[in-house]
Structure formats: structure tokens, C-alpha cells
Image: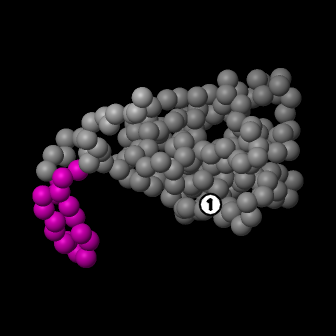
Amino acid sequence: MAASPTENNYINFVEMTFIDDTLYFKAEDDDNLESDYFGKIELRLSILRNLNDQVLFVDRREQPVFEDMTDCDILDNEPRTTFEIYIYKDSQPRGLAVAICVKCEKYYTLSCENKNISFKEIHPPDNINETKSDIIFFQRAVPGHDDKRQFESSLYEGYFLACKKEKDLYKLTLKKQDDSRDKSIMFTVINK
């Protein structure tokens, strides 16, 4: 049996206008059109690990670092080891849009503002009326690694969360992906 077409999935344009060198279209019926935005839809509690099996941890200065931890250490250091990953609906198919948060004494959301990784003292909003945000990352599976994930910045295309050794610490940073085999941008996400 052949598939039958469902509803008409097209837009009738009735007018065009140039404004500041940009062409805009006016739809005949725009009731079913959706604006570009991120909308919060789900929460997951997760532990994040780098490829050295170190756990992402928020230190006392609210800095994201990786440390070797046993399961008991992880429990003893909650909530600094358990991240709230908010999943957002994205009006564009670019990966799973997420915000990464932690609740210690206060509520913090991971930001890559100015390409620097830090925690902002904010709760992630229900809606973000933009297509890019310093707190939204696209979580994607890593090809060839079923249990590994990458987090690309929505604000800086081609930049990913990465694990970088600085002196005796492994820090969470933002890094431009130079090589598809770069293991520093791969993480294990363990949902609780």
C-alpha cells in the first residue's frame, strides 16, 4: 500500500519586503509558524566523566575541574558532582540542546561567555528567544563511541567543552575542534 500524503506542509507567502538589506516574507497564515528559540522541556541528573574516568566536580571557587573519585567520594561530594542537565527544545535540528547546571549553596549554570568556561549564578530560563546562547550546548554522540558525548557551544560554532591539564589540575575549557579524533572533547554522561 502506498503512503498517502498527510496535511499540506507548505507556506503561502503573500508579500515580500526588503528591510536593511534583508528580505522578509509575510505568510498568508502564520498560526503554525514557530519562532527560533530554545524551550526547556526535561531535566536529567547526571555525572560527567572525562576519558581518564575523572569526575567533573565544582570546586569551592565554583570552578569546574576533573578529579579522581571513588563512588563513595562522588556521594560524599554531592551536590558538587551531580549536574542538572536541562534539555531544551530547539527550533533548528542541531543536536540535543542542553544547559548544564549545579546546585551547591546557590544555583549555577555553565557558561562559555567570551569563550571562557565559568559558572554563572543563574537558574536556566524556561525559554531563550535566540538561536545562540552562552549557556546552551549541543550534546551529540561521538561517532564510533556509543557511550561518549561531545558538547558543542551554540554561541561559538566548532567550539566544544574539553578537558585540559593545567599544572596539577584537569580543567573544563572551551576548545576549537581541530581534529575529529580529539579525545579531550569526549565525555561519558552517566544519568542517575
Locate the C terminus and report the quarter of the image it occupies.
top right
Quarter holding the N terminus is top left
Name the residue tied to disc 1: 159
Placement of 35 over or under 164, stated as above or below: above
Residue 124, image x, y percentages? 47, 39
Q: Nearer the viewer, residue 107 or 153?
A: 153
Residue 121 vs 74, above or below: the answer is: below
Residue 92 relative to residue 28: left or right: right
* Image-quadrant location for residue 182: bottom right
**Residue visible at 23% across and 50% down?**
11
Q: Is residue 189 above or below residue 61?
A: above
Q: Residue at x 44, y 39 (%)?
A: 89
Residue 178 image position (x, y, % from top left): 71, 67
Coordinates of residue 184 in the picture (x, y in percent): 77, 54
- Direction from residue 164 to residue 131 in the image, left or right: left
Q: Is residue 118 magenta?
A: no
- Mark 1: few/some/many CA within 10 Å (<14, 14-19, 20+): many
Q: Is residue 9 visible?
A: yes
Q: Secondary structure at mark 1?
A: strand
Number of marks: 1
At 84% across and 33% down in the image, what residue appears?
69
Q: Is residue 15 magenta?
A: yes
Magenta-highlighted residues? 11-27
Query: Would residue 49 be found to the left or right of residue 16 on screen?
Result: right
Asked whether 104 or 186 is in front, the reply is 186
Under mark 1, the amino acid is Tyr
| Position in image of residue 81 (x %, y %) | 71, 33
Between 186 and 61, the one nearer to me in the picture: 186
Q: Nearer the viewer, residue 109 or 15?
A: 15
